[in-house]
């Protein structure tokens, strides 16, 4: 799996009105622990609304007949990076979940693609898409992707999914219930999209769905891993750092499904998408491949870098709240190479050169990693 070795240098990137503040620290110093939050600090219940305070988002406390059943963190407990509200109808047959989470690469099109993939993995040939598209949310036009389904899972549920991006946050909405209550499910999603609010400085981005076409056949040549020095590792880490709207410039809307491979301990195949157009120009930073591991934003991204007359392809492993900068290659790795890196079969390919840890506050910590120098023989 993804591995790291000895910490060589740490850089802190802290959000401030004047921009990113940078400070160098040696690995001999003790780093401040990541900020933690209680549920009371993350959520504010007032009247008929419940607000996620870190992003200035609020939601109705009641959705039709559904009421809040519980509030939780799906992962990274206490960090405020992976949050959920579960709503239930009085008979517990219709249910809704609001997820607010901070994947390192927050891309709504890829989130919608992978959510649909996960829904199909949980269902059989009886699954049908009954509606959806690019819709409004919170009074903002064109910011959410919605898809309605019937025949979800073996229970043949009606289900609806919608997602959008505000700042570095992905907001994913899910409503499901018995097939005979499909109208209730879809009305609940419509109400949730209508009644959520963007109340802080974090605004939603216009969104676009992933468009897919046919992929050209791979050349079959395995990409060669190239040596990188600390300066290039620092450049790659800065490039990989989450920088607001820049994400939309790095990941384009046009992809082609390349292949699927199955990883150990995963319930289904991992889809691989390749960009249909490559980057051009000096200092370009363009995603050319993504292997989508989970619908919470866990993925491997290959970024084409054209810088100082040299073209490199950099691998990045994204998760909620973290990016690991992996190897640099002379070409786009094959699907088999990506599979071997993710499975742990390619141990060297899974070694991180840098790790970027994000906090819910918007601050982040970049750690450059280096293997220990070989010992000098005593003469």
Image (tube, rainbow, N blue to C red):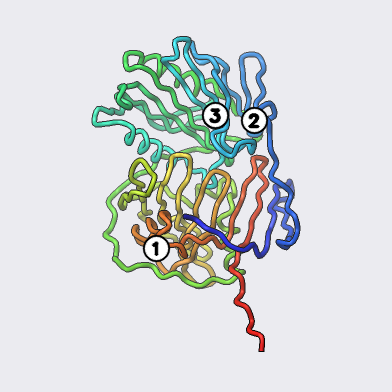
Image mark for residue 225: none
Label 3–label 2 contact, CB within 8 A:
no
Q: Residue at x 40, y 40 (%)?
A: 114
- Lateral position of residue 83 relative to residue 176, left or right: right
User: Toward which corner of the image does residue 150 lie, by quadrant?
Assistant: top left
At a point 51% along the width and 19% down the height, the residue shown is 87
| Structural distance between the alpha carbons of marks 1 and 3 | 36 Å
The residue at which mark 3 appears reads as 84
| Marks 1 and 2, the one that precedes in the sequence | 2
Q: In the structure shown, which secondary structural element does the residue marked by tag 1 occupy?
A: loop
Q: Secondary structure at mark 3?
A: strand
Residue at which label 2 appears:
56
- Residue 195 relative to residue 368: left or right: left
- Percent x, y for residue 327? 49, 64
When the figure is inspected, residue 12 is found, relative to residue 233, above or below; the finding is above
For disc 3, the neighbor class at 10 Å (few under 14, some 14 to 19, many from 20) is: some
Q: Residue furthest left?
A: 125
Left or right, residue 122 beside residue 56: left
Instruction: Name the secondary structure under disc 2.
Output: loop
The earlier-in-sequence mark between 3 and 2 is 2
For the residue pair 128 and 265, the one nearer the viewer reads as: 265
Q: Which residue is mark 1?
A: 332
Residue 125: % across, % down: 24, 31
Nearest-to-viewer mark from 3 and 2:
3
Q: Residues within 10 Å of mark 2 (few under 14, many from 20)?
A: some
Quarter of the image containing the C terminus? bottom right
Give how far across and how far down residue 8 sits, in percent.
Answer: 66, 65
Residue at the spot 61% in from the left edge and 69% down from the top edge: 230
Disc 3 versus disc 2: distance between alpha carbons? Answer: 15 Å
Foreground tag (1 vs 3): 3
């Amino acid at each position: 799996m993804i591995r790291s070795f000895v910490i060589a240098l740490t850089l802190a990137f802290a959000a401030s009105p004047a921009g990113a503040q940078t400070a160098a620290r040696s690995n001999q110093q003790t780093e401040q622990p990541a900020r933690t939050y209680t549920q009371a600090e993350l959520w504010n219940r007032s009247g008929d609304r419940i607000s996620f305070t870190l992003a200035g988002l609020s939601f109705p406390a009641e959705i039709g007949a559904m009421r809040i059943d519980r509030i939780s963190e799906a992962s990274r407990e206490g960090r405020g990076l992976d949050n959920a509200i579960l709503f239930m109808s009085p008979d517990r047959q219709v249910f809704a979940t609001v997820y607010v989470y901070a994947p390192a690469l927050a891309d709504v099109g890829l989130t919608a693609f992978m959510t649909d993939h996960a829904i199909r993995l949980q269902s059989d040939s009886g699954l049908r898409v009954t509606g959806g598209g690019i819709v409004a949310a919170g009074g903002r036009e064109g910011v959410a992707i919605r898809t309605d389904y019937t025949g979800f899972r073996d229970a043949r549920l009606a289900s609806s999914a919608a997602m959008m991006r505000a700042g570095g946050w992905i907001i994913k909405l899910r409503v499901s219930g018995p097939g005979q209550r499909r109208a209730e499910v879809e009305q609940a999603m419509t109400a949730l999209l209508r009644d959520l609010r963007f109340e802080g400085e974090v605004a939603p981005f216009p969104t676009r769905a992933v468009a897919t076409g046919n992929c050209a056949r791979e050349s079959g040549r395995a990409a060669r891993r190239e040596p990188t020095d600390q300066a290039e590792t620092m450049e790659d880490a800065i490039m990989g750092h989450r920088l607001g709207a820049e994400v939309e410039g790095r990941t384009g809307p046009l992809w082609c499904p390349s292949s699927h491979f199955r990883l150990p301990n995963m319930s289904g195949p991992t889809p691989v998408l390749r960009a249909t157009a490559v980057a051009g120009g000096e200092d370009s930073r363009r995603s050319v491949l993504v292997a989508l591991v989970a619908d919470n934003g866990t993925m491997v991204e290959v970024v084409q870098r054209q810088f100082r007359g040299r073209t490199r392809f950099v691998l990045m492993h994204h998760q909620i709240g973290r990016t690991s900068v992996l190897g640099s290659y002379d070409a786009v790795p094959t699907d088999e190479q990506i599979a071997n890196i993710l499975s742990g079969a390619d141990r060297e390919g899974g070694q991180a050169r840098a790790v970027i840890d994000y906090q819910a506050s918007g601050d982040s910590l970049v750690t450059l990693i280096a293997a220990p120098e070989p010992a000098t023989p005593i003469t």
